[in-house]
Image (tube, grey):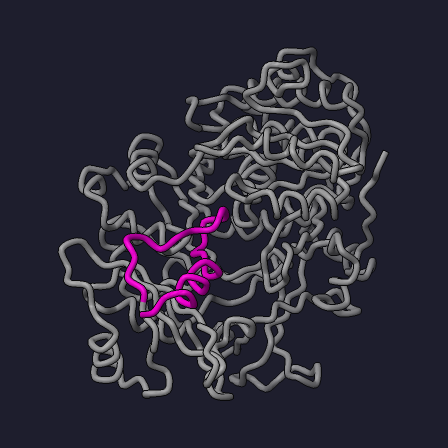
Amino acid sequence: MTVLATHDLVPAPLRRWWAQAGYYPGEGIYALFARHARAHPHRSAVIDDDGEISYAELDDLALRLAAGLRDLGLRPGEVVATQLPSGRQSVAVDLAAAALGAVVLAYPVGRGRRDTLALLVRSRAAVAVVAAKAGDVAYADQLDALRDRLPDLRTVVVAGGSGPDSLEALAAGRRLEALPPVDASGPARILVSSGSEAAPKMIVYSHDALTGGRGAFIGSLHDGDRPMRNLFLVPLGSSFGSSGTAVTLARHGGTLIVAGRFETGRALELIDRHEPHLVFGVATMFAMMLDHPRLARTGTSSLRAMVAGGSRIDPATVAAVRERFGCAVVNCYGSADGVNCTTDPAEPPREIHEAVGRPNSAVAAIRIVGENGRDVPAGEVGEIWGLGPMSPLCYVDPEFDGRYRTDGGWARTGDLGRIDEHGYLHVVGRRNEIVIRGGRNLSPVEVELLLAQHPAVRQVACVGVPDRLMGERMGACIAVREGAEPPTLTTLAAYLSGVHGLETAKLPERLAVLGELPLTAAGKIDKRWLREHLAGSAT
């Protein structure tokens, strides 16, 4: 038995105060879900590639899986690693593990052997639940090849398998009737963040931090007059997608709409057929949907907001989404480390681009801190720190605790920002994404947002490209709108300097024109791949 070692970096009196203030439900994820299953058993819980499953049906599936996992030896506090496409099976495993008091380490389909090995070794996962195959990748075979390097891994459960330990076999067994007690302040899930480390960071969250802190974030976007219906275009195994099971279902009793993988036309079909109220994705996904012919025949009257996370969204895209989807746009700033701030759906496009809203004390308070560890005056730039009810417990790797958290529990994001005189948070950029050209710090975000307004540019990302003379040079990677003439480096430079007045030192010096910008498994633009592509290009 290998129980995950955890400790809470937030002072205990502060956690107790948040609980007394009503920020925490005080029950485990499964217990909260079960309340909704009893209250409205016939409501649709999950809509996925296989159709709809009700709360009563999902509850039955979760309890059968819980019984099967317990029979395989899973005990409270042990880690269950899951790599499954978004759908009822991934949700049911989340709930089954929560019912047993186990800890879910979810990571998206698309992460390869290197990440899988790093995550399972460092978390000491006792059980892994993986897809037999997703797309062209045989994940079960991939994991099987790593078994001799995973001494703590006792059992592998395969979704789409045929043996007695397959997910389907467990689901066909008996229900778990006697549930162990689960501490809502104890560990429930490990979120994975690539961050700036060589290997992914793993951050441990409690039941309360997920359903309470993250629940308040999602709840603030909902109008409250009708049962919540949320479409997640990002994988449920990602950090952004962690608000699927724990929040949409367990905390708010809503309907969760997902697809096994993102396809532009399929996303529009889900909006048209299943009428979500909130759509969670990244700006790149929204831009792709705007360009798709299916949008012209997609009903969008149900939509309240498109919620963009992962990267800043430019004013032109905000305006286009509002016009063509007929709903608000929310710019969501956050990190797996426990920081969150979102714009108000009523904000105009320019404000959504310029700022990321006012901090919500029910989610996370925000500080802007200078190099000396003290808060900087209003309007000045410093590092963004966050602390609030959604703050996680700790990192799986203890050495990260001191690097990214303070003695009082504040999370150090590594992001640079400022708070203006009206209390709005502005994100200037990431320290580790700053391009250092000849000793000068340049912001790739600044250039991205200007290039995004070029009439020929459909997608854009800027990255630093290693250079022997200057250290780094600014590189731009773009995808061109259909029918548009691909711009050259010279014409883009003329546009940036002539139209926007961008100074010469900030102009891109490398250019890659691609059909589509590649996405990571979490749905973000894969800047690491773009850097490597530009570094090996003669452009």
Image coordinates for residue 371, horizontal then vertical, percent: 66, 84
Q: Which of 483 and 49 is in front in this view?
A: 483
Q: Which of 178 and 436 is in front in this view?
A: 436
Compared across the picture, whether 251 is left or right of 531 comes to right
Image coordinates for residue 15, horizontal then vertical, percent: 77, 56
Magenta stretch, residue numbers: 512-539
Residue located 81% across and 33% down the image: 76
Q: Nearer the viewer, residue 511 or 340?
A: 511
Residue 10 drawn above or below residue 177: below
Q: Indicate the quadrant containing the C terminus: top left, top right, bottom left or bottom right.
A: bottom left
Residue located 47% across and 77% down the image: 435
Compared across the picture, whether 288 is left or right of 4 comes to left
In which image quadrant can residue 494 be found?
Answer: bottom left
Residue 221 drawn above or below residue 244: below
Residue located 68% across and 43% down the image: 189
Compared across the picture, whether 242 is left or right of 503 comes to right
Residue 491 drawn above or below residue 56: below
Spot the residue most to the right: 1
Residue 424 visible: no
Image coordinates for residue 524, horizontal then vertical, percent: 45, 54
Image coordinates for residue 342, horizontal then vertical, percent: 48, 60
515 inside magenta stretch: yes
36 inside magenta stretch: no
Q: Indicate the quadrant containing the N terminus: top left, top right, bottom left or bottom right.
A: top right
Residue 196 visible: yes
